[in-house]
Structure formats: structure tokens, C-alpha cells
Image (spheres, rainbow, N blue to C red):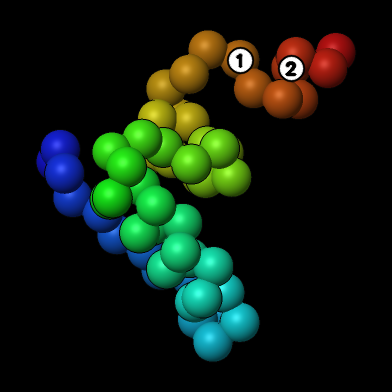
Amino acid sequence: MPGCHVAFSHSGATLGLIAGELTAYEVLTGTGHPLLEDFRPERFTRRGNRETERS
């Protein structure tokens, strides 16, 4: 759903601050933060992955 942002983690108390900062960056700028690139849902539809690219 375009415009919908969700941030969650197993270690909420540990990672909550950085997750909030990165999510706020994306909401305010309208651009993806490079640190979150590997965790986007689109990673499942991209051709290749790091393991196959290294081979």
C-alpha cells in the first residue's frame, strides 16, 4: 500500500530508536534510506541475491 510505513522488531527497546529515526527519515523525505534497503518486501522479487552474486 503506497504511503504506508510500518516499523517493528523483536528487540523493540534496543532497536526502537534507530527504527524510528529511519522510518521518520523515509516519511519526511519520501525516499528510502540505504540502511533499510536489505529489509524491504521487494527483496523477495529482485533477481539474484548476495549469495548468488558472490558465486
- Which image quadrant: the N terminus? top left
Above-or-below relation of 27 to 11: above
Q: How many callouts does the rendering have?
A: 2
Callout 2 environment at 10 Å: few (<14), some (14 to 19), or many (20+)? few
Residue 50: x and y, percent? 72, 25
**7, 28: nearer the viewer:** 28
Residue 22: x and y, percent? 46, 56
Residue sticking out furthest to the right: 55
> Could you tell me which residue is drawn at 28 percent across and 50 percent down?
28
Residue 48: x and y, percent? 61, 15
Residue 19 is at least partly visible in this image: yes
**In the drawing, what numbered circle is on residue 48?**
1
Above-or-below relation of 8 to 41: below
Tell me the amino acid under the disc marked 1: Gly
> Could you tell me which residue is drawn at 42 percent across and 68 percent down?
20
Callout 2 secondary element:
helix
> Could you tell me which residue is drawn at 46 percent across and 64 percent down?
21
**43, 29: nearer the viewer:** 29
Tell me the amino acid under the disc marked 2: Thr
**In the drawing, what numbered circle is on residue 52?**
2
The answer to whether the residues at label 2 and label 1 have Cβ atoms under 8 Å apart is: yes
Callout 1 secondary element:
loop
Callout 1 environment at 10 Å: few (<14), some (14 to 19), or many (20+)? few
**29, 39: nearer the viewer:** 29
